[in-house]
Amino acid sequence: MISRVSSLLNKPLLRRFTRDALLALDPEQAHKATLLALKSGMITSSSAKDPIELNTSIAGVLLSNPVGMAAGFDKNAEVFQALDGLGFGFCEVGTITPNPQNGNAKPRLFRLMPAKAVINRMGFNNQGHNATYERLKIKRPFGAAPVGINIGANKDSEDFVGDYVSGVRKFAKIASYLTINISSPNTPGLRGLQSPQMLERLLGETLDERARQTGNTPVFLKIAPNLTLEAMDDIAATIAKTDLNGLIVSNTTITREGVEGLRHASEEGGLSGQPIFETSTIKLAQMRQRVGPDMAIIGVGGVHSAASALAKFEAGANAIQLYTALVFEGLELLSEIKKGLVAAIKENNCTSIKQLVGTKTNDWAQRNLSS
């Protein structure tokens, strides 16, 4: 029965019906239903090999294609293997905190349908280090898509930095890369770690812990999209003193530009989806200017089409991540983006996605120099 359903779900009409049914559910219930379908094998996709033009790497991590699932979808590392089977080039699980926590009170997840956007104030709800580690420690087959592990701090922690160090200690040996998430707006005080003094301490202690582990696992820093030019200068200056491997630009935004007046727009939390595409892409380009061409950058925020995905690479991303757009566009979006990127590579007389990285960094960075 499951194989029959799987076959049907590959048909566009039924996939659209399934997506419409999920959109009719409460957002958090729809998310749980999607996870259940992935775990049961009811959602499948083609296992076709990615075109060689899409092969790339981030901080030494090899990717068959540069389109990943962003953190927040698979919080507890329950479906990372299924995401590999769907054709993602990599996925990022978490955010994971040392101790389990329920997150903020419900409702805490809201769709802004006309804008194809979402506001969340989940609050790092997750099952904690130990439960997630048990799922991630399994031996994975050769060629499986890399899995990044996004680590955070418990809301009631007396030492946020210590929680991040604990995350590095727990997961460095099994992660393809680690992400230090200090840019969520839903844990009070967390974004304060982006200040120069706190960031210097945070990176110093987490990277020292990474050095004590085997394998030299790449570490990325995920930053907010609301940073001023001066704040980005400070971050770039701070990370230049370290051996941090990369940036993820960017997290959700606390502003409501582009969704004013819509139902749920006044809800507290981080806004994601199409309305943050331009801001997050400008910030990506501005950070690329500040860190130079060699540091790996993962672009996330508002990717909703092949054209918007291409723009992230042109602005300076080495790889990109999706999440919110999949809620509205469905899994077909992944294959559409990959096909669009291959077409763009050929149209530009290139042979690899790597050749398109940063080709329009200055153009994007100059779109909002006063921000």
Image (tube, rainbow, N blue to C red):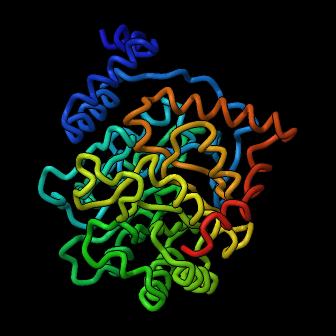
Residue 59 percent location from the top left of the image: 64, 61
Q: Residue farthest to the front?
A: 261
Question: Residue at point 70% right, 71% down?
Answer: 289
Question: Residue at point 35% right, 23% down?
Answer: 41
Q: Residue farthest to the bottom?
A: 197
Q: Is residue 324 left or right of residue 238?
A: left
Of 184 and 118, the residue lying toward us: 118
Residue 268 percent location from the top left of the image: 23, 61
Q: Is residue 109 left or right of residue 80?
A: left
Which quadrant of the figure contains the C terminus? bottom right
Residue 368 percent location from the top left of the image: 60, 67
Q: Is residue 282 left or right of residue 273?
A: right
On screen, residue 29 above or below 276? above
Of 152 and 191, the residue lying toward us: 191
- Which of the 4 image quadrants contains residue 64? top right
Question: Residue at point 22% right, 78% down?
Answer: 157
The answer to whether any part of residue 215 appears in the image is no
The answer to whether any part of residue 63 appears in the image is yes
Q: Is residue 99 left or right of residue 181?
A: left
Which quadrant of the figure contains the N terminus? top left
Question: Residue at point 61% right, 61% down?
Answer: 297
Residue 363 percent location from the top left of the image: 72, 61
How many numbered markers are drawn?
A: 0
Q: Residue farthest to the left?
A: 105
Of 130 and 320, the residue lying toward us: 320
- Which of the 4 image quadrants contains residue 238? bottom right
Q: Residue farthest to the right?
A: 349
Of 65 and 77, the residue lying toward us: 65
